[in-house]
Image (cartoon, helix red, strand yellow):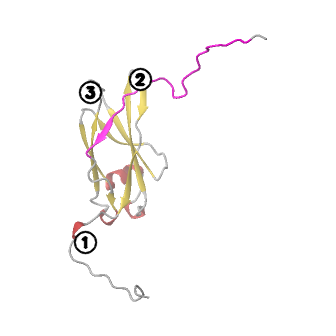
Amino acid sequence: MMYSVSCEELPDPAGERGVAVVPGITNLNPGVFDVNDLQHAYVQFTVILPEGVTVPQATLIGSFNNNHADVTIKELTSFPAVVNITSADAAQKLGIALADIERGDVFDFELLITANGRTTRSTPLAIPVACVYTTAMSTGSFHSVSEDWNS
């Protein structure tokens, strides 16, 4: 009996490594669009690049409820970049009326970065449409009563 072993190198299923510029998103505050004030609601965050990496620009794209519209929201040309997106601006660019946005809807934002002749896409930043937490509604002294608690 004769056995033969081969060491054929297979292609990496993840693709070529070390070529993408991976941006960081920090300081997300606030992180939701307030359903009760969509005309004035906004999100803000900072886009950073790895140390020593420079790119001429990054394109922030957006979509709504997984529609993959990939509409340009903003162009970023210097880093770190503080990004402020209003729900009204995002909705307008995506062709959505504010009146059609409901609690539970989700906006997705991604960064397209071209470097070394390749355009790569960041992981989506999901921004939900929700009721904003109000501290005044949850501080103080509360007393709850129910007729059937003692039954």
Q: Quadrant of the C terminus?
A: bottom left
Disc 3 target residue: 51
> In percent of the image, x 45 and y 24: which residue is there?
17
Dot placed on the residue nearer the N-terminal end, 1 or 3: 3
For the residues marked 3 and 2, what is the alpha-carbon distance in whole angstroms?
Answer: 15 Å
**Residue 137: assigned label:** 1
> In percent of the image, x 42 and y 54: which residue is there?
106
Nearer mark to the viewer, of 1 and 2: 1
Q: Is residue 18 above or below residue 61?
A: above
| CB contact under 8 Å: marks 1 and 3 | no
Q: Is residue 141 above or below residue 97?
A: below
Label 2 crowd bin: few (<14), some (14–19), many (20+), radius 10 Å = few
Most frequent secondary structure within the magenta stretch = loop
Q: Position of residue 139 (x, y in %)?
A: 22, 71
Q: Range of the magenta residues?
A: 3-27
Label 3 crowd bin: few (<14), some (14–19), many (20+), radius 10 Å = few
Dot placed on the residue nearer the N-terminal end, 3 or 2: 2
Disc 2 target residue: 19
> In percent of the image, x 67 and y 13: which residue is there?
5
Dot 1: what SS?
Answer: helix
**Residue 148: assigned label:** none
Kind of residue at badge 1: Met
